[in-house]
Amino acid sequence: MTIRFLLLVNKQGQTRLANYNECLPLEERRQIEGEIVRKCLARSDKQCSFVEHRNYKVIYRRYASLFFIVGVDGEENELAIYEFIHCVVETLDRHFGNVCELDIMFHLEKAHYILDEMVMNGCIVETNKAIVLTQAAHFDHPPGT
């Protein structure tokens, strides 16, 4: 398993989406989220987007008012995850039409569905945006309806 968690957080530090691929108690999730979010938000734009925290490598990117934060195992390639974050954002952009915080808040189940099409059990299984979006369209309008 490589991707341990993926968080979408706004500039105020509020988590808008959390996707965990490992079993952690709720209290530990809150603690980890708080520590990582504070660490990422405190960094300047000139600093590297890779941080080590506990036993995770944390890779993050900022798009407008949202931070996309991914925690991975220590041996994972940071640049590959950095590019994967961009792929996720492009996919969400195509689906929602310039994705924003409100899209995530009001369509949380759809955002989770798109992520689940791309990541399964912590492994990246699909990066082709067209395939992911085709599956997402079935979520909105199941065949035969």
Image: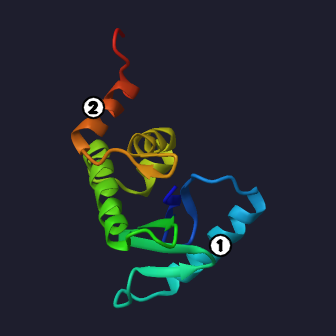
Q: Position of residue 26 (x, y in %)?
A: 75, 57
User: Which residue lies under the disc numbered 1?
Assistant: 34
Name the outermost residue toward the top: 144
What crowding class fits label 1: few (fewer than 14 Cα within 10 Å), some (14-19), or many (20 or more)? Answer: some
Q: Position of residue 93 (x, y in %)?
A: 28, 51
Residue 63 position (above or below residue 126) = below
User: Which residue lies under the disc numbered 2?
Assistant: 134
Q: Position of residue 92 (x, y in %)?
A: 33, 49
| Residue at x-position 63% and y-position 68% | 33
Quarter occupied by residue 117: top left
Q: Position of residue 5 (x, y in %)?
A: 54, 59
Quarter occupied by residue 36: bottom right
| Residue at x-position 43% and y-position 68% | 76
Element marked by disc 2? helix
What's the coloring here?
Answer: rainbow
Residue 32 position (above or below residue 19) = below
N-terminal of the two: label 1 or label 2?
Answer: 1
Q: Amino acid at mark 2?
A: Thr
Nearest the viewer among 2 and 85 is: 2
What crowding class fits label 2: few (fewer than 14 Cα within 10 Å), some (14-19), or many (20 or more)? Answer: few
| Residue at x-position 29% and y-position 64% | 83
Marks 1,2: beta carbons within 8 A:
no
